Image (cartoon, helix red, strand yellow):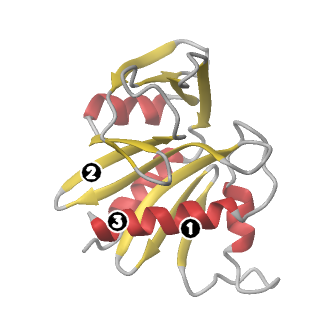
Amino acid sequence: MIKLSALMALLLCASLAVGQAGFNKPIVAAQAKAATADNTGEPAAENKAVYQDWLINCAQGNCIVHQYILDEQEHVVSSVSIHQKEQQLLITFTVPLMTRIDKGVVVKIIRYDEKEIFQQRYHYSYCTQIGCMLTYPLSQSLMQAMQAGRKMQLNFASLDGHEHSATHSMFGFTKALQAYRELPQE
């Protein structure tokens, strides 16, 4: 858990230093550009792969599939990451500090025709300096909805009671998950 948390912290900090992305826009394109060793387009020494709006990062034998959403000041609004612990796939949703932890996060998956195909409330697992995280086993129903969906909404409330929604693109998720599953895991 400590190795994975350190990896997530490193990736989150690195994502804050990359590109200018607007609120509710994945920063994968900027990360892909930053992942090249120089302007030749050759990959850097770190193992990264881009699948449309999703990114796979590997460091020290640990890999994650993830996507971050930044606001205009390049603060992380939310992130979604998938990683493996032993033989189980886990999903982690991260939202900012100063959120109402008693409310949890409502995750919705919306299809291309704007029909909601998944909705579930998740309760917080823990908060760190990075943000508040919700880590759960990746259920078959959520995974199938993510593969069939166009977007994922994370809905949460701030301490002042205001409701917030961060929308993640599902473009490239299925291919990223497939590639992730083919990677050797420690």
Looking at the rendered image, the disc whose residue lies closer to the viewer, 3 or 2, is: 3
- Where 39 sits versus 3, above or below? below
Query: Image point 26% across, 34% down: which residue?
Result: 140
Task: Kindly identify the amino acid type of the residue bearing the numbered disc 2.
Answer: Leu
C-alpha gap between disc 1 and disc 2: 19 Å
Reading the image, the residue beneath label 1 is: 49
Residue 172 percent coordinates (x, y): 57, 47
Q: Residue furthest top?
A: 115
Name the quadrant containing residue 142: top left
Q: Is residue 93 above or below residue 180?
A: above
Q: Quadrant of the N terminus?
A: bottom left
Up the image or down, 63 lies above or below 20; here it is below
Residue bearing the label numbered 2:
89
Quarter holding residue 40: bottom right
Judge by depth and name the residue closer to the eye, 125 or 129. Answer: 129
Q: Secondary structure at mark 2?
A: strand
Residue 169 shown left or right of residue 101 in the figure = right
Q: Is residue 133 left or right of residue 10?
A: left
**Residue 33 location in percent, x, y?**
75, 69
| SS category of the residue bearing label 1 | strand
Q: Residue at x 40, y 18 (%)?
A: 119
Can you give x and y, in whole percent of width and height, for residue 101 in the image?
39, 28
The residue located at (81%, 54%) in the rendering is 20
Looking at the picture, how far across and down is residue 118, in whole percent?
41, 19
Q: Which residue is mark 3?
A: 4
Which one is in front in this view, the residue at disc 3 or the one at disc 1? 3
Q: CA distance from mark 3 to mark 2?
A: 13 Å
Residue placed most toward the observer, 115 or 58: 58
Amino acid type at circle 3 is: Leu
